[in-house]
Amino acid sequence: MENSTAIIFSHFLAPEHGTYMTCLTPILIIIILVSFQALNVRCSDKSNRHQLQLPPGPKPWPVIGCLPQMLRNRPTFAWIHQLMKDMNTEIACIRLGNVHVIPVTCPNIAREFLKSQDEAFSSRPDFMSNKLVSKRYLTTALSPSGDQWKKMKKILVTSFLSPAKHQLFYGKRLEEADNLVSYLYSQCKNNPEKGGLVNVRLATRHYCGNVIRKIVFNKRNFGEGMKDGGPGIEEKEHIDAIFTILSYLFSFCISDYMPSLIGLDLEGHEKVLKENTDIVNKYHDPIIEERIQQWRNGMKDQEEDLLDILIALKDDNSNPLLSIEEIKAQITEIMIATVDNPSNAAEWAIAEMINQPEIIKKAVEELDRVVGRERLVQESDFAKLQYVKACAREAFRLHPLEPFNIPHVSTVDTTVANYFIPKGSHVLLSRMGLGRNPKVWDEPHKYKPERHLSNGDDVELIEPKLRFISFSTGRRGCIGVNLGTSMTVMLFARLLQGFSWSAPLGKSVIDLNESKTGLALAQPLVALAKPRLPQALYQELTSSVNYS
Ligand code: HEM
């Protein structure tokens, strides 16, 4: 049975990241039907256990469900959203293998899942990718609900993400904010009048990588780094590997829905994930192992970074609270959780704002009014930067990097929005569907920061009402809101305060097309940056920065 299924599926394969497959042939359909009928497999889309219907969705095949359609229609997120549009529904049920996948684009229904019935939907799927990256579920975000998730979450909240610890790491965040400005200045200092071309994606991703490497390992570079403060080969390889892992984490891998195919790696996802986790481990492991030795030998007894904090944690019997594997897995997950959202939001916001210069003008006016031009923006200024925060918030609404929130898995049979949701369903709150829902947002595809200022409230990046997903909410909501907000607002505010941004010479606008396989800008944003503060400020900064 395993082999026949594998053979059948090898004809359908079209990795989310690879080539597209040929059409389903009638012969293949017959083979599938005959083989499954012979096995007397039960096929039912409606629950016999329950009066209520499942949410609407395409008719599934016996056993394999809608996997053939999924494989024929990569990328899967676009197929799912098109299906929902065609069916005119804001909740659907698409059976993939034996899993009921429930995408949602309506905030009221999203709140039923993550607020009214949060506990029932607080687990995570058992995916090959999650298992591999979390070293068999030793971490927080990727692990199913249970004792290990509770333990790791508690440790992160108390020893890393509490307000007191957030304050403790302030100096490291500030150093990297200064390094960012100094690095960008180095790209345009040869001709400050004309400015210089900046790869904004590279700069924003590396700012995030630098901040989290400094917090975790007390250093930004694994190698020598670059003289201008830019990433060296090692940092580039590290960040690229993390972004590759991210893109393969929830990528509708076929064996996640057909467990009989586990181990065959038909689409090559496992190979890519292994290669890239190996790269990350190549940089992390020696530092972690050496540091543990230093603590054991008594060569170290002061906590200088998060790694020290994790190593020094003790249980009730004064034994180490975390194993080496737990520390390694959790640090990788922290890197993954930190780098994508702030960098993507800043890149998109700058791209959108270059095409609407009046928005840049308003944001810069606010920065000049609140901060002035004689010093650089600090975290203590954030409370008064309402318009700047509205611009960042608008980027989260309109341009999430991932089409869906991390899947939530139900642990009981239940009812939501009058539909039956069976135990084990994977609930996918659609980040793009919620944020661009025309019933919720006027001109949903327009980048319009003003929409977040109309009610006079303080602008924040959180959105607990789930009208779009930034940090989500509930038991599985993001626990890194403070750090994530600080990084996003600082990155974005420094880009705007320090430099005037425009399209490269010869181009009138930035091309805002999304990539074919996801929601990132199709091409990394390259823009013209001109220093806009007094030269002396940059020169003073450049002479004092610490690139180690
Ligand atoms: C702007 C930056 C960030 C954004 C937009 C963001 C967003 C999110 C989202 C959408 C989730 C999933 C929530 C759900 O499943 O419903 C999440 C989970 C999580 N985030 Fe963040 N995050 C950010 C930064 C961070 C940072 C800096 C950390 C710290 C290391 C972090 C740690 C986590 C963890 C541990 C979880 C999993 C919680 C759980 O499953 O119990 N995040 N985040």
Image (spheres, rainbow, N blue to C red):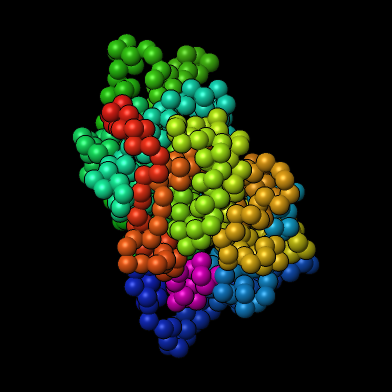
The answer to whether residue 66 is left or right of residue 264 is right
72 in magenta: yes
- From the viewer's side, name the closer residue of 77 and 537: 537
Task: Work out whether 419 lies above or below 414.
Answer: below
Which quadrant does the C terminus fall into? top left
The answer to whether residue 470 is left or right of residue 301 is right
Q: Position of residue 228 (x, y in %)?
A: 24, 39
Q: Is residue 251 visible?
A: no
- From the viewer's side, name the closer residue of 75 and 53: 75
Count of labels shown?
0
Q: Position of residue 42 (x, y in %)?
A: 60, 72
Residue shown at the point (41%, 53%) measured from the top left:
501
Q: Position of residue 54 (x, y in %)?
A: 70, 68
Q: Is residue 543 visible?
A: yes
Which quadrant does the N terminus fall into? bottom left
Residue shown at the point (36%, 49%) measured from the top left:
530
- From the viewer's side, name the closer residue of 67 and 89: 89
The answer to whether residue 235 is left or right of residue 447 is left
The secondary structure that most of the magenta stretch takes on is helix
103 in magenta: no
Task: Work out whether 82 lies above or below 240.
Answer: below
Residue shown at the point (26%, 35%) measured from the top left:
222
- From the viewer's side, name the closer residue of 328 and 44: 328
Residue shown at the point (62%, 78%) measured from the top left:
86
The answer to whether residue 510 is left or right of residue 80 is left
Which residue is outermost to the bottom? 26
Q: Position of residue 425 (x, y in %)?
A: 61, 58
* Highlighted magenta segment, given as a residue range: 67-80
